[in-house]
Structure formats: C-alpha cells, structure tokens
Image (cartoon, helix red, strand yellow):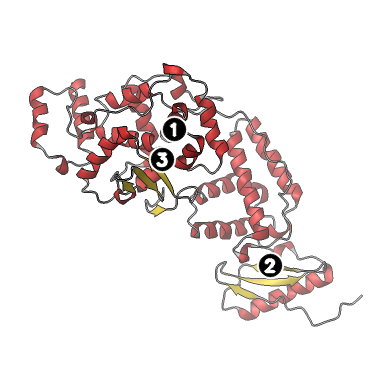
Amino acid sequence: MTQMGRPPTGCPKWDPDAKQWIARILMPSGGRRPVHMPGIAEHETDRAHATAKRVALRARNGGFVPAASLETVNEWFERWASAREAKGLASVRNDRGRFTKWISPALGTEPMATVPRRKLEELVQSLDRSVRADALAWKTATNVWGVATKMFTDACRSKVLSLRCRDENPARDVEGPDRGAERSGAYLFPSEFEALLRCERVPVRWKRIFMLTTYLYVRGGELEALEWNSVSFEHGYVLIHQSADASTGLAKATKTKDVRKVPIEPSLLPLLRKMHIEANGQGRVVAPMPPREEWAERLRKYLGWAGVTRSDLFADDAIRRQISFHDLRHTGITWRAVRGDEPLKVMRAAGHDDLRTTQRYINEAQTFEGPSFGLPFRAVPIEQLSTFGRTFGLSDADNSIRSQITEQSQRPYVDEFRTALVELAAAA
C-alpha cells in the first residue's frame, strides 16, 4: 500500500557538538531515529537536505536505514569520549585504550544504532578466550566490558542528546566476562612503617609523603592537591575536597565527587605544624609532589633499604600483588579498623560510597587480636622528619654544617642530593 502524507525530508540539522549533520528519520515501526551523516561540511546545506531526504525515503519504503548511512561504533565512540573529556572524567584515557585494543576490533565498523545483542555476546566470548589464554587479566576483561556497557547505556539515555541513537540497549542482560580470584592487597604493619621512617637512607621528603598519605589515608592525587587552607589545626581535621589531575596537575573533584573531613591523628600534628611553618601556611602541603610514575617504585625501594622484606609485600602472582603507593591509604584505613574505630566514622573519613567497602577492612582487622599487630599511628620523632636532621654516613663535623642552614631556605631535593652523596661515598 502506498503511504500517504507529506514527503519525508529527514529534518536535517547541524550538530555543533558532533560537528556533523544529523537527520531525524521517521521509522515504519513508529518513532524517529537520529542518523548521523558524516562527511558533509556545515556549509553544504543542500547536500545535507538531499542526503537526509534520500535516507528518509528508504526508511519509509524499505523499512530500514542502509548501514552505510549510519554512524559506526568507532565514529560514535570518538564523540562519546570527547563528551566525557569535556566533563573532566579522568578515566577517558584508559577507556580509549580498552576500546582501541578490545572493543573496536569486534564492533568498530558496525553501525552504532543497529549493533545486535549477538555482537555483544561474541565480544564477551572473545574476552573470556583471551583470559583463558593468559593474554588478558580477568579484571581487565571486566573493565573492558564496563566500557562497552556504559557506551550502549549512553547511546540510549545520555544527557548529551546528540549521543542518543538507540531505543534499546543490546548489552542489557548479557552475561559479562567470567570473574577470577581476587588478588590480595598489601598493607604495612606499624612496625614495618616505623622501620621505613627510621631508615636514615630514606630521603626525608619521601618520609613525609609516606607519613601524610598513611596517617590521612588519602589518595595520591588528593595529597598532591591538598592546600594549607584545607588544614584546620584549631578543629583538628583536614578537608579533602579536590584531587590533582594525573595529566595536568590541575585541581579537580575527588574520585567520588564528595567532600570529607579527615581527623588529624595527634601523632601527625608535629609534622604538619613543622611543614606549615616552612611553607608560611601558603600553597600546597607537598610542593611539588614527585612524578607519579616514581611513587610505587620509590616505596618498594625504600622498604628494601629499611629491611622490610615480607614476601607478601613484593609478591606478584595469581593471588597476590606487590605493594603500591595506593596501599599506604589501605594501610591507614586498616589501622583504624584494627584500632576499633566506629565503622561509619571510618567510612566517612575514608570517602567510601558504601559501607561494604569499609567492611573489607574490618574483616581484615578481625584477623588480629592483642599486641601481635602493633600500635597504629605511632608518634615519630620530629628529627627523623626534619630536612636537616642528622645525615647517615657523614662525620659529626659534616653534620654540624646543617645547623648553619635555615630550614626555610631548603629545597625539596636537598635531602635526596645528600643521600646520593652518601651512596657515592659508600661505593667509593
């Protein structure tokens, strides 16, 4: 039967965000579908109208839109990733890598608007095969699947309207990749942390970073962005409300977008007051932070210097992972749980969204009873955290020079330079 009514036009419109013409096609089944028309410049109005009309006529007469006129998954992903970057999401860089390596080869040339459920099931099977072949960690496979499901969810209901191109989500109810065994995380016992801070070979700058991260149990980016105006000595807390971007170093929202107050442990106050005086109470608390790629490497190196060699800290196998810088945060939270602090208070101070996350630390704490664990958050003699404290391996005469230099004039790398001199002297 010949369809009556006014001729279809496709209602083409230029999308400044996508930098593409988009047609709105009335489908025989009812409803309109946005169809991207890449390759047509903004000034090519006549061409855009002609293409939209042609696609609309095909949809009316044939009941389908030719795949050649639809935006591919690869093309759609680029617009999606750009929109997420505009929102300041730090995960976009990892999302791009996961998409390029695992999702694009399986789905990239498919029209985003018509990818069937079967293709998503095949993607999951491919990920499972890669895990079984030891070409991919199961947790990475789970992260890849997370990117895929988020893409198709946003294709249905994104707040960025130009990203919507589907009425149904083909990833819904698709069973994700198989999960493997969780690798146990690492944390330091109080005695191990004390050995790290007492080791005279470890640069004071790094001792301070380790102590602040552990006693405030902050994420590395949060410590990097922490400013003195967020430290309240009067009321005894540190306000955590921002984090440093891994790429630019600029301040942004925290991982959970929440603002939280972390109580200052009494044993941390002497160091904070000393650093506050050195900085005249201005700027960032740790300025500058070392490059991120050094954080974990330095921690493991200095633990070795301090004689902390427990195998669980350095093992990297199917059930254990070696200690990372982020595990200093885990250390501080575990210490609070072992100390018996109220779970809700620990949850709020740690910035957990769910009490179940905090419960994992409480479960670990229940393994230890009595003095076998050690005393958490012990006081550290301030001379061990003073930039011009006694330098290991130098004579008393050499060490006397330090009293002639004011701490206000020291620079972040002075103590590391002195450590390097000691090592060179020992090697000679």
What amino acid is labelled 2 in the image?
Answer: Val
Q: Position of residue 105 (x, y in %)?
A: 64, 47
Q: Is residue 283 shown above or below 16?
A: above
Disc 1 residue crowd, few under 14, some 14–19, many 20+, Cα 10 Å? many
**Could you say which is closer to the camera, residue 261 or residue 135?**
261
Which residue lies under the disc numbered 1? 327
Q: Is residue 124 left or right of residue 428?
A: right
Q: Nearer the viewer, mark 3 or mark 1?
A: 3
Which residue lies under the disc numbered 2? 35
Write down the quadrant of residue 141 in the picture. top right
Residue sitting at x 19%, y 24%? 392
What amino acid is labelled 3 in the image?
Answer: Val
Mark 1 and 2 residues: CB-CB less than 8 Å, in contact? Answer: no
Query: What is the count of numbered marks?
Result: 3
Kindly report the distance in space between the C-alpha atoms of the residues bearing marks 1 and 2. Answer: 47 Å
For residue 221, say whether it is visible. Answer: no
What amino acid is labelled 1 in the image?
Answer: Asp
Q: Position of residue 219 (x, y in %)?
A: 42, 41
Going from N to C along the chain, the mark reached first, 3 or 1, is 3
Going from N to C along the chain, the mark reached first, 3 or 2, is 2
Q: Position of residue 161 (x, y in %)?
A: 62, 66
Which residue lies under the disc numbered 3? 218
Residue sitting at x 37%, y 35%? 215
Q: Quick one: SS at disc 1?
A: helix
Q: Nearer the viewer, mark 1 or mark 2?
A: 1
